[in-house]
Image (cartoon, grey):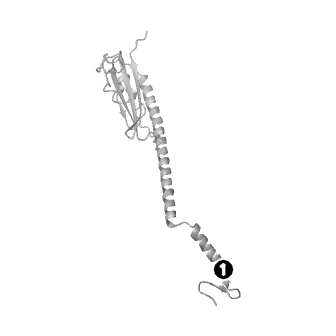
Amino acid sequence: MTSKYVQLDESRRTPSRYYARMCSLSDFRAKHAFSYIEATIGMVILGLGIVTGLSLYASYARGTTIEIEEAIAKQLCSELMEEIMSKNFESGAYASGSFGRAVSELVRADFDDVDDYDGWLEKPIQDVYGNDITDPVYEGYARAVVVTNVDIDNLTTVAMDGSTAAKLIKVVVSKNQKVRAVLACHRTRYQRN
């Protein structure tokens, strides 16, 4: 006689080996298996770990990008500052005390003294002759220059435009309207012997 649930070995009247194996396997699964709640909690924890890892990586990538932009901006600042500092303190062609560009000075190649750079804004970055530099590395960068007369006794005190013995030159480089580098120098008048 056989039951629907229990197959008996007629000769021994004991459950078959197959049934015994199935019972022990299902008992094992019931005792050692994951429930849906445990699996869901594990997935949530794993998801939070992935989101945290990605946000840390994004922060690192942004920081690296900013460092690269600042390095390029510093190079652009120092390049323009060197050019400015190589010019005369004042133009010899104009009366002492004149400040700013002459009408004929349209590109940097025409600038002959430090204060000609006052108010200079360049976007996109240009060479000394006014040609745009098309290198994609410099895309989005802009340079601005401010030159002010300062008191020789106190280099932080701004003086009226005209002839003073010292000038403050400030070059600002920005990338996508965010300042990435600022370089300031003083230039003083000196007499050659």
Residue extending farthest to the top is 193
Residue extending farthest to the bottom is 1
Q: Is residue 171 left or right of residue 10?
A: left
Residue extending farthest to the front is 13
Up the image or down, 172 lies above or below 39; here it is above
* Residue 169 seen in this snapshot: yes
Up the image or down, 32 lies above or below 94; here it is below
Where does the image place residue 85, in percent across and percent down from the top left?
42, 23
Of 19 and 88, nearer the camera is 19
Up the image or down, 172 lies above or below 168; here it is below
Q: The residue under label 1 is which amino acid type? A: Tyr
Q: Is residue 61 left or right of residue 90?
A: right
Point out the image quarter for the C terminus: top left
Point out the image quarter for the N terminus: bottom right
Where does the image place residue 7, in percent across and percent down from the top left?
64, 85
Of 47 and 154, nearer the camera is 47
Task: Name the residue at 63% across, 74% down.
Answer: 24
Residue extending farthest to the right is 11
Task: Name the residue at 52% across, 67% down.
Answer: 35
Q: How many marks?
A: 1
Q: Which residue is mark 1?
A: 18
Task: Name the residue at 63% across, 88% down.
Answer: 2
Where does the image place residue 141, in percent across and percent down from the top left?
41, 38
Choose top left, top right, bottom left or bottom right for residue 191. top left
